Image (cartoon, rainbow, N blue to C red):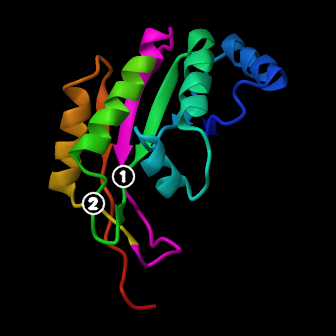
């Protein structure tokens, strides 16, 4: 299951997820920001990052999770070291609240986004951002590279 974690606090969702314990499962929770301002930019909405973090922690107390973090460029700029380190702090917060994390997946755009201002982080820089996270958290980190899409249709 892949989730944006917004509804993981709902009792009916928790009940449905508890059924996963009966067999093999994977739950991937999206966490694409470490700060509220960047979260609003990346999500395109005024949602609570703290709610997402708390929901992931709550779900992670019952099920082992994978965190999936998308890092695109916006207007040519990546999120920057400070934002990525703040995301690592959020991951540590989830773990401190009892959330069991199996893996952190770090990736960038892999296909042409709907908005031209969104782009792909080059492999070397994505490796650097992943290394920042890996240096701060005690969870394995895997990198998934983007791919250059055609500039003409």
Q: Position of residue 3 (x, y in %)?
A: 62, 38
Q: Is residue 42 magenta?
A: no
Q: Residues within 10 Å of mark 1 (few under 14, many from 20)?
A: many
Name the residue located 62 percent from the left edge and 19 percent from the top edge.
59
Q: Can residue 64 be seen here?
A: yes
Point out the stretch of residues depicted in magenta.
94-117
Name the residue located 27 percent from the left edge and 64 percent from the top edge.
77
Tell me if 104 is positioned left or right of 7 in this view: left
Q: Count the marks.
A: 2
Numbered disc 2: secondary structure = loop
Evaluate if marks 1 and 2 touch, with contact meaning CB atoms under 8 Å apart. yes
Q: Can residue 101 be seen here?
A: no
Name the residue located 67 percent from the left edge and 12 percent from the top edge.
21
Which residue is the site of mark 1?
A: 71
Number of the label disc, if any, that sits on residue 121:
2
Q: Is residue 105 magenta?
A: yes
Query: Looking at the picture, does residue 148 appear above or below residue 124?
Result: below
Q: Position of residue 113 (x, y in %)?
A: 48, 71
Number of the label disc, if any, that sits on residue 151:
none
User: Which residue sits furthest right?
Assistant: 12
């Amino acid at each position: 299951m892949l989730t944006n974690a917004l509804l993981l606090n709902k009792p009916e969702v928790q009940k449905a997820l508890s059924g996963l314990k009966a067999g093999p499962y994977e739950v991937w929770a999206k966490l694409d920001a470490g700060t509220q301002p960047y979260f609003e930019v990346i999500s395109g909405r005024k949602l609570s990052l703290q709610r997402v973090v708390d929901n992931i922690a709550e779900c992670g107390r019952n099920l082992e999770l994978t965190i999936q973090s998308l890092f695109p460029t916006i207007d040519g700029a990546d999120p920057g070291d400070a934002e990525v380190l703040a995301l690592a702090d959020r991951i540590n917060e989830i773990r401190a609240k009892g959330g069991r994390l199996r893996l952190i997946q770090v990736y960038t755009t892999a296909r042409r986004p709907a908005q031209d201002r969104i782009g792909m982080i080059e492999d070397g820089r994505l490796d650097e951002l992943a290394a920042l996270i890996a240096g701060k958290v005690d969870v394995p980190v895997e990198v998934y590279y983007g791919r250059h899409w055609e500039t003409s249709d």
